[in-house]
Image (tube, rainbow, N blue to C red):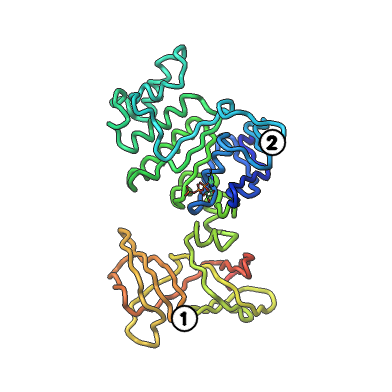
Amino acid sequence: MDTLQIELKSISKRFGDTQAVNNITLKVKKGSILSVVGPSGCGKTTLLRLIAGFENPDQGELLIGGTPIWDQVNNVPVQKRNTGMIFQDGALFPHLDVQQNIGFAINKDEGENSVNSLIELVGLKEKKTRMPHELSGGEQQRVALARSLATNPSTLLLDEPFSNLDIQIRKDIRTEVKDILKSYNMTAIFVTHDQQEAAEMGDQIAIMKDGQIEQIGDPEEVYTNPTTEFTATFFSQANMVNCDIDKKKLKTFISETDLDIDGDLNRNMRVLMYPHQLKIEPSSSSEEKNGIVKKRIFQGNTHGYTVELENKEIIDLIQIERVPIQPGSPVKVTYLPGEFVICFDKGVQKTFKVG
Ligand code: ATP
């Protein structure tokens, strides 16, 4: 049976006029990683600080390993919560070398063995006598991870631990860190504002906005079935396009799609179009043309395009490159729907089968 490691029930926290965390309820199973992703200022760090005990909630209940940690009668102090926290900058002790940083929290009787095995685990055997300033950003974060694991926490809270690293190092280190967390069967909450990183690190992903959780679930499920327009645009990076559902047809400025629906509908909604469902071609004839390229971003084997359609809607799409299309060029954009289309009717998600 899956055991719950972290449980938040209706947790809120306000700073003056700012409702940083607003009535959050969530559960994290033992050994599982929850990624929390959301834009700047949505309350991610506050959420972690409440769990760690650096802030007290205004209301709600917080349990770790089934034990009440904070509620109307309990308030377990930070050092007794058995959680480890890793910050953006690693926060290493600058006057201690790698092994001293890692060994700092281990009592002497447990000895060198555990320090050495942690140094080995994070791949810094050859650099164990280096000072923090003699390490790269990625190495510093590995030391921070080993130092947190040294205290044998039941839960790790990671606050944008890779955001100061460059993109290639980030990709490598997140795989390594995930493997290490999994080898420890560690329960972790991983905060980031990077959608890709959140999806790769998390067994579950929580999309946060304005102090609330918009959606929580398996990353693939959230990507393919966003239940709010915010999740669709922020996490799935999809376009939301105006559409008319007219009897059994879904009509947008660039497309007409037959729907398999009972009865006839007649409504204006917004339809979700993923960037990969849109095809772009240069267009020389004015009948074919339906937009103008505003921006092109080189992404290696793909190009990202931003197109302004003739009805002024802006859409983003991805194309595996043949010949790049220059900004300013007239283009024809075509929509290639999958088996289902996801629409939002005044914010309420509706899914239709394509027929
Ligand atoms: P970022 O991604 O930029 O780090 P975040 O999602 O982690 O942002 P928080 O740091 O949790 O967001 O902040 C949430 C809101 O609460 C913000 O509006 C912030 O200004 C406010 N806030 C956070 N801590 C305090 C504090 N100690 N005093 C006053 N306001 C605060």
Q: What residue appears at the point 47 percent right and 61 percent down from the top-left corner?
A: 237
Above or below — where is 133 with respect to 203?
above
Residue 18 at what x, y percent from top left?
A: 58, 51
Identify which residue, 249 or 80, lies in the foreground.
Answer: 80
Residue 219 at what x, y percent from top left?
A: 52, 51
Q: From the image, tell me which residue sits under label 1.
A: 311
Residue 294 at what x, y percent from top left?
A: 36, 73
Q: What residue appears at the point 40 percent right and 22 percent down from the top-left corner?
A: 117
Q: What residue appears at the point 49 percent right and 44 percent down from the top-left corner?
A: 191
- The answer to whether residue 1 is visible is no
Identify which residue, 218 or 14, lies in the foreground.
Answer: 14
Mark 1: few, some, or many residues within 10 Å (few <14, many ≥20)? few
What's the CA distance linking mark 2 and mark 1? 53 Å
Quarter holding the N terminus is: top right
Give the amino acid at mark 1.
Asn
Q: From the image, tell me which residue sits under label 2.
A: 71
Q: What residue appears at the point 52 percent right and 33 percent down from the top-left corner?
A: 186
